[in-house]
Amino acid sequence: MHYIISIVGLLLVLFLAWLASNNKKNIKYRPIIVMIVIQLILGFLLLKTGIGEFLIKGFADSFAKLLEYANEGTNFVFGGMANEGAHTFFLYVLMPIVFMSAIIGILQHYKILPFMIKYIGFVLSKINGMGKLESYNAVAAAIVGQNEVFISVKNQIGFLPKHRLYTLCASAMSTVSMSIVGSYMTMLEPKYVVAALILNLFGGFIIASIINPYEVQAEEDIIEVQEGEKQTFFEMLGEYIMDGFKVAIIVGVMLVGFVGLIALINGVFDGIFGITFQGFLGYVFAPIAFVMGVPWHEAVNAGSIMATKLVANEFVAMLDFVKIQDSFSERTAAIVSVFLISFANFGSIGTIVGAVKGLNEKQGNVVARFGLKLLYGASLVSVLSAIIIGIVF
């Protein structure tokens, strides 16, 4: 029965994307079908085969080792601040972002990441039927983050038409930065984090191909990657370490504000209506959770976590999810976990608008005008990836 519900959910997501399409007659259905099949195959391989288990274990073990090294630096600086055996969120979830940012900087400095991004993007452009720039941007956003990716193509930002700019921004909101992946793995099952990273990449292309279809002429499809001013190794390292620290502080401060505000709103709602705000949102989002493949008796709690991610951010939602994940079935935990792995929330609209506006004021204003449509598309990507997991699980 759950297969039928998930397939209905899949068709519903595609229909909702179609309703928002700005050019329904120009939608290319063949690449979309191919990418959905690829998602199903990759989801099955990653979660249901020995090969996938081996690959995910290798990926997860690598990140676990990196987190151990990151904790060495954290313990050296902050040792004694946390009680013995305690797991302080700021120290052991956010501070590793600093170390991971340094690793990404080193890989960037020695041209390893640019090489990978360029050729993975080239292969993807042959599959998705979109431009090379769009494919490059999607892969780059999944590795270096939604702000840094715009810097890498800043020479082209000012010349991009509205439809191409939308796709670039949608890719950035539908994925997550590799520097934060390790932090997610401290709260969620690593296999679901890895699966979400890959599925969201294709999901972003699928939804963008429906909402925002267009043709890219060969003469327009040129990638000019801005490398920035040449830096020495230690200049680069210091810059990436500080960037990682800024991200950790920003996420921490956002959590202080959001968690406190949600607690306040929960208290007000509970006092007036006898139900918390998150409990109310759980009922609103329960039908969405249900068509994603979550059994109805778990849909309200799952819907509450999903809503928290949308109105706050994925970290706040993960913190709430960790508290109740043992009450979910394994399949529901997998679906909700995959849904949480993206930057699709209201706060990301401001982040992306600010990143583009910092490079080009005019284009930043263009992005601001379609900000809600960006969030709509990115949210559909999260739902689509979760449905794929529900089908193959």
Image: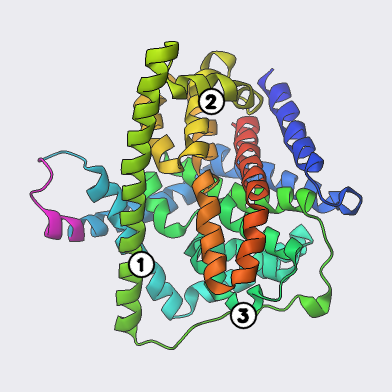
Callout 1 secondary element? helix
Q: Residue at x 50, y 20 (%)?
A: 280
Quick check: can you spot residue 61? no
Residue type for callout 1: Asp
Q: Residue at x 55, y 32 (%)?
A: 335
Check the image and report above or below for 12 versus 21. Answer: above
Side of 24 where 355 appears, left or right: left
Q: CA distance from mark 3 to mark 1?
A: 22 Å
| Span of residues in magenta | 73-83
Q: Residues within 10 Å of mark 2 (few under 14, many from 20)?
A: many
Callout 3 secondary element? helix
Q: Residue at x 75, y 31 (%)?
A: 12
Give the number of the disc on residue 243.
1
Magenta highlight on residue 51: no
Work out whether residue 163 or residue 121 is closer to the camera in this orientation and state it.
163
Side of 154 where 97 appears, left or right: left
How is the structure coloured here? rainbow
Looking at the rendering, which quadrant does residue 134 occupy? Answer: bottom right
The image position of residue 345, as x and y in percent, is 53, 44
- Residue on which the image places disc 2: 303
